[in-house]
Amino acid sequence: MAIRNTAGNKRLAATLLQLEQSFPTEYVGYAIASSHESHALNIDEHQAIFNAVSHGDRRAARGAMRSHVLHLGATVIRYLDERGFWS
């Protein structure tokens, strides 16, 4: 949310807000809590994003954020698959 709020990108802010309102966010927390990768998702990847943003490195920030979102997405999908969410 901090990045969304300070990015100054209205399209990004609207897209993320819509996603936050339509996705059952509790599953994200459950997926992270049950993941062996939770340290990477919560600490390491956020640190990489923070470092890139704080150094004004847009390319690195975009790459770190993209990597984090894809990693988190895969973790949530795996969590939902393992619990038969789709059936």
Image: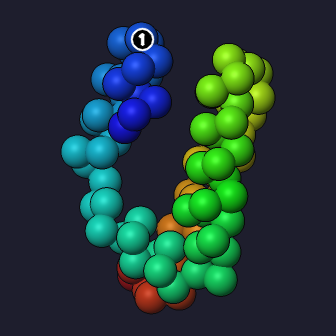
Is residue 66 among what the camera can see?
no
Tell me the residue at 45%/88% (across/down): 83
Up-down relation of residue 38 to residue 57 (above or below): below
Residue 10 visible to an observer of this rendering = yes
Q: Please give the residue where the numbered disc 1 appears in the rendered image.
A: 8
The quadrant of the picture occupied by the C terminus is: bottom left
> Residue sitting at 74 percent across and 34 percent down?
63
Identity of the residue drawn at 36% across and 12% down: 10
Q: How many labels does the image show?
A: 1
Locate residue 13, reporting x and y percent.
Answer: 36, 23
Instruction: Determine whether, in the image, residue 51 is placed left or right of residue 69.
Output: right
Q: How crowded is mark 1: few (under 14 residues within 10 Å), some or many (20 or more)?
A: few
Which amino acid, by three-letter code, is at mark 1?
Gly
- The x and y percentages for residue 77 are 54, 68
Secondary element at tag 1: loop
Establish if 75 lies above or below 63: below
- The single residue placed furthest to the left in the displayed view is 21
Residue 19 location, quadrant = top left
Residue 30 screen position, x and y as percent: 40, 78
* Residue sitting nearer the eye, 49 or 25: 49
Please state which of residues 5 and 9 is positioned toward the viewer in this rendering: 5
Q: Quadrant of the N terminus?
A: top left
- Give the residue at x 70% y 23%: 55
Query: Is residue 52 depicted above or below 36 in this figure?
Result: above
The colour scheme used here is: rainbow
Residue 21 horizontal/vertical position (percent): 23, 45
